[in-house]
Structure formats: C-alpha cells, structure tokens
Image (cartoon, rainbow, N blue to C red):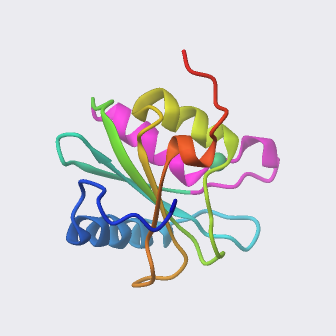
Amino acid sequence: MPGTREDTGISKQQWEELAAAAWECRENAYIQGDTRVGAARLTGSGKIFTGCNLEHIFRCHDVHAEVNAITSMVAAGATDLKAIIIVAECGLFTPCGGCLDWIFQLGGPDCLVACQARAGGEIRVFTAAELMPQYPRY
Ligand SMILES: [Zn+2]
C-alpha cells in the first residue's frame, strides 16, 4: 500500500536523520502565512540537502521547500536525487505539481517522497509515480 512501505532501501535511521534535518531547516522558513515547510533530500552518494519555504508578498514568487532543497543540491554539484522528505504541521503534506516536476526530472518516477506531520511522527513513504501516476514519461 502506498505510504506504508517498509522496504525503501533507506534505513529507519536514515529517514529519521532526513526528517530531523528537514524540521531543523523548517525553523528558518520565511513566511507570509501560517505554514512553515521543511524538506531534506538524500542523494545517491548519501549527502543531505535541506530547504524551507520562502513566501513573497507577491505570492507568485514563493519558493517551496522542495525546490529550495533542490537548488541547494544542484548548487553543490549534485543531481542524483534518491529521496526527499517534506515536513509540515499540516496532515499529509505532499509536494505540489511544480515540485513534483523537479522531483521527476532529477529523481525519476521511482524517487522516494516521504511526508511527516510532526517531529518524531509516522513517516509515510511514496514514490513520485504513486503521487502522480499519469505523469508523462520522456
Ligand atoms: Zn511545491
């Protein structure tokens, strides 16, 4: 069942490390509204990159936490996205379509996408393809 898988190729400890990094980065969120979001990415070589959301007064300029983490990863010279976790005190907070575009481009349909609604809470893991099953394949 999507979101409840046990065998992700990433240990429970690694998921917890990713989640902790995302919650820490979330504290730096620059927001206009109420929703702070953090994200942490794991590359194939085991490096972690984090991001938080930045909200502009002209909301069309908002930068989502997932994209912020991707830009940090690419700026550091890495493009091998293996997994991402998104943390927000907002129930099941999955990436928007724009963020999934980036996740598909750098991680492919099998990229692991996890969500956590509170620090230390359940980590639900999906693949990008499970979140957007009709996504075009190039
Ligand atoms: Zn987004």
Q: Is residue 130 above or below residue 18?
A: above
Observer-nearest of 96 and 129: 129
Q: Does the magenta stretch include residue 91?
A: no
Q: Is residue 109 above or below residue 41?
A: above
Q: Is residue 72 magenta?
A: yes
Q: What residue is shown at x 68% (from left), y 41% (from top)?
A: 97
Give the quarter of the figure containing the C terminus.
Answer: top right
The magenta stretch is: 53-76
Observer-nearest of 77 and 95: 95
Q: In this view, does 12 lie above or below 100?
A: below
Q: Quadrant of residue 135?
A: top right
Where is residue 122 drawn, in percent x and y? 45, 79
Q: Is residue 23 visible in the rendered structure shown here? A: yes
Q: What residue is shown at x 53% (from left), y 34% (from top)?
A: 102
Image side of residue 3 versus residue 20, left or right: right
Q: What residue is shown at x 73% (from left), y 74% (from top)?
A: 34
Q: Is residue 67 visible in the rendered structure shown here? A: no
Where is residue 56 drawn, in percent x and y? 73, 51
Of all residues, the one furthest to the top in this rendering is 138
Observer-nearest of 64 and 29: 64
